[in-house]
Image (cartoon, helix red, strand yellow):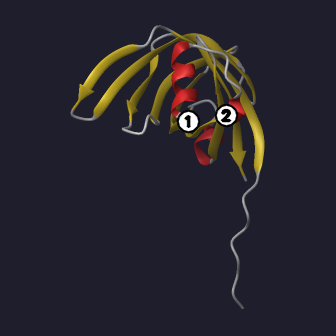
Amino acid sequence: MTRVPPVPSLVPAFEVVAELGPLEDHGMTRAGHRRIIPVVGGTITGEFTGTILAGGADWQVVRADGSIEIDGRYSARADDGSLLYIRARGVRSGDPGVLEALLRGDDVDPDAYYFRAALTLESAARPEFERTVYVASYIREASRVRYVAYRVI
């Protein structure tokens, strides 16, 4: 008998609203066109509820086609004081005109571009987060990014 692996499904886990600082354009480096966007605060609600701490950032590389490699790293503090570290690796891509509009801070329909990431979570207080795979679907706004994280089961 040949067994078939289970088909994964997604369960909403938490929502993040990350407030962003001004884009820092480092220009063309050996890694590519490097941009860094500071994370200056925000909120997280759902299976973990708390405040996003200032000091994180999204370290981006802009590809030749205008797509962006996402590498976000930041922390959140729960109402009980426990900490959660989030690392998001993904991609934002779309029509060049749409990507330019996002860069200007225009309000763009999230269906007009692709913005997804895989999340890695670390938490001493919530070890179950470290044993689960999460993916996220994003919306980019002028001064913040919002996403819903889904637990893959």
Of helix, strand and loop, which one carries label 1?
loop
Point 29% across, 33% down: residue: 32
Point 68% across, 72% down: residue: 5
Mark 1 neighbour class, 10 Å CA radius: few under 14, some 14 to 19, many 20 or more: some
In the image, is residue 115 above or below residue 82?
below
Q: Amino acid at mark 2?
A: Ala
Residue 84 in picture, x, y percent from top left: 58, 26
Residue furthest to the front in view is 97
* Residue nearest the observer in this picture, 29 or 102: 102
* Numbered badge on residue 95: 1
Residue 148 appearing in the image:
no
Residue 108 in picture, x, y percent from top left: 67, 22
In the image, is residue 143 above or below residue 62?
above
Point 71% across, 41% down: residue: 150
- Image side of residue 97 versus residue 61, left or right: right
In the image, is residue 62 above or below residue 20?
below
Mark 2 neighbour class, 10 Å CA radius: few under 14, some 14 to 19, many 20 or more: few
Point 62% across, 30% down: residue: 125
Of helix, strand and loop, which one carries label 2?
helix
* Residue nearest the observer in this picture, 83 or 52: 52
Quadrant holding the N terminus: bottom right
Residue 67 appearing in the image:
yes
* Numbered badge on residue 12: none
Mark positioned earlier in the residue sequence (1 or 2): 1
Label 2, on which residue?
112
- Marks 1 and 2: CB-CB under 8 Å? yes
